[in-house]
Image: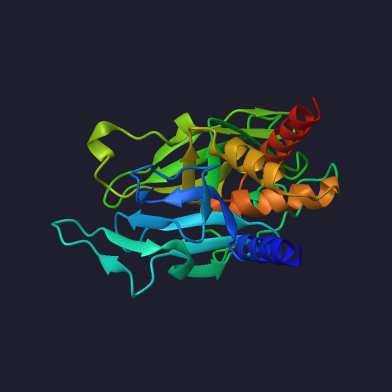
Amino acid sequence: MRKAVGILFFLFIFCKSFAQYTVTKVIGSVKKISGEPLKTGSTLSDNDVLLFSTPNDMVRVIVAGKGIYVINPSSKAEKKQDATSTVMEVLKYTMHVKSKEGYLSGRGENVEMVPDAFETDGTVNSKNLIENTNKFIFNSRKYDVSNGSKFFLQISFEGAKPVIRPLKTMVDTLFLNADDFKINVDDVSKKAEYAIGFFSRQKGSSELLADINPYLDQANEMEAIINVVISQSKEQDKTILQQQCYSEVYGALGKPSDVDFKNSFDKAIAARKN
């Protein structure tokens, strides 16, 4: 009997010694040795062998009870003997770097306003997350659009005249959509720079308010990440859980609109309760 208990105890300790990982985001192309590609929601364990398409590939994962980590192949990863730059390594030997958290500045019903809503923390992620449709709140007294003044998106190319696209507003809400960032086929090979500006009809002049470095999320990645974080978290406090979700969306994809993030988070919470 004692022997059986000892074996069970050993198996319990053995199993607990292997971390469990849930993927939130893959940058590049990473597969298990079986050929199964990693994607948001994939699960991994320490002994899984990963194939990275390049040494620069990254995988963001939730480690149960420990938080979010970014995994890269280490300098000791084995390079495959072929024409590709694929490297292979057991997960537990890869580089594990704790992800820095991005904090949701808006609390409760408050949200970060234009232009601060576009300011990013480069140590977390320098990208602005742009979904198919996005809403940003602005101070309607400071930016009065009732008199014909307008917000605009400026798209600049070196050696060419900037493209100016007027943006839709409603009361105190600025609408910014993924389609606004589309460029002509002739410009695809050029590096585009984006900025939000405001034209004051009263002053008869324009000013640029903030640069934008867009990450276009056209596959609902934000919702997928929120659902994964909620499913893996044991947190019961909604405010803390919301912060956990925001932090990973920011780190993995870019800084989102507070309005759209909160709507997606509330939608995911409501679905979990049903």
In this view of the protein, can residue 253 be seen by the observer? no
Where does the C terminus fall, quadrant-wise? top right
Question: Which of 139/178 is in front?
Answer: 178
* Furthest-front residue in this view: 1
Q: Is residue 198 above or below residue 252?
A: above
The spot of residue 182 in percent (x, y) is 39, 33
* Furthest-bottom residue in this view: 76
Numbered marks: total: 0
Residue drawn at (71%, 43%) of the image: 230
The spot of residue 76 in percent (x, y) is 33, 75
The spot of residue 177 in percent (x, y) is 53, 32
For residue 89, which quarter of the picture? bottom left
Colour scheme of this structure image?
A: rainbow
The spot of residue 136 in percent (x, y) is 67, 39
In this view of the protein, can residue 26 be seen by the observer? yes
162 with respect to 255 (left or right) = left
Q: Is residue 218 above or below residue 161?
A: above
Q: Is residue 44 above or below residue 222?
A: below
230 with respect to 238 (left or right) = left
211 with respect to 88 (left or right) = right
Residue drawn at (53%, 69%) of the image: 97
Residue drawn at (54%, 59%) of the image: 125
Question: Which of 270/92 is in front?
Answer: 92
Q: Is residue 211 above or below residue 7?
A: above
Where does the N terminus fall, quadrant-wise? bottom right
Question: Which of 19/76 is in front?
Answer: 19
* Furthest-top residue in this view: 274
